[in-house]
Image (cartoon, helix red, strand yellow):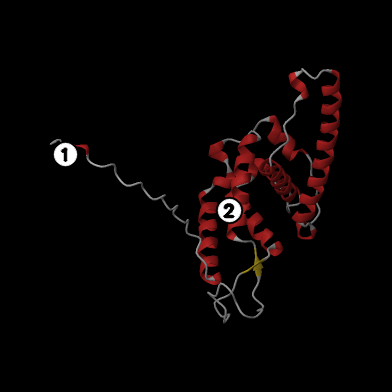
Amino acid sequence: MMNSLQEFESSSNNKDMINTNPMSIITSSSSSSSSMMTISSTTSASSSTTSPSSPSATTTTPSRYENQKRRDWNTFGQYLRNHRPPLSLSRCSGAHVLEFLRYLDQFGKTKVHTQICPFFGHPNPPAPCPCPLRQAWGSLDALIGRLRAAFEENGGKPEANPFGARAVRLYLREVRDSQAKARGISYEKKKRKRPPQPPPPPNATGTDLDH
């Protein structure tokens, strides 16, 4: 592993992960990130005043995707440090990624009806029910995509990427299918409608040449 992965594993925290809410981790990470950006913006403004023609005075703001990817990466790192026993990234496998996804379910906000629920398969149930809340398939799928990219951007090898493991792909497919049935919705990708084709030009060979 490269230095960035070693830094990812350097700190350790032995608190029980059950008491750690990843939402609070994301919030704290986001606030510290905002402070860093504020400092960076102030520095950039002062340097642009002294030398407006300098190329280094121009800074780019990270996209929303990049900010979310960094927060997800930090959250997963916190989860590994609080794992019992603590788990290093180099020893992380697809099975540990599945543990992480199941752990996140307790913070989900999507109602997933059980088979014994009278609203099973109904997209718009008319009344509340005691069925559990889970992470939506779309959220998990997007999360794994960001973590998979972050792993390789931080020095991980593609062939050793635990977020791309076959077990993770199968789990996401199972969640998609089960939630589609329970919620009565379809996750099939909608085909883009092709724009109407213009009528073909008149056939030049059919032009009357007789005068």
The x and y percentages for residue 204 are 21, 37
Amino acid on which disc 2 is placed: Asp
Q: Earlier in the sequence, mark 1 or mark 2?
A: 2
The picture places residue 191, in percent across and down from the top left corner, at: 44, 54
Q: Residues within 10 Å of mark 1 (few under 14, many from 20)?
A: few
Q: Is residue 88 visible?
A: no
Taking depth in this image into account, of 110 and 198 the one nearest to the observer is: 198
Identified by mark 1, the residue type is Asp
Quadrant in the picture for residue 11: top right
> In the shown orientation, is residue 42 left or right of residue 184?
right
How far is disc 1 from disc 2 in space, using C-alphas?
62 Å
Q: Quadrant of the C terminus?
A: top left
The residue labelled by disc 2 is 141
Q: Secondary structure at mark 2?
A: helix
Q: Name the spot of residue 42 as percent of width and height, x first.
A: 86, 31
Q: Residue at x 25, y 42 (%)?
A: 202
162 relative to 69 in the view: left or right: left
x, y percent for residue 57: 78, 23
Give the residue pinned by disc 1.
208
Residue at x 55%, y 62% (from the top left corner):
175
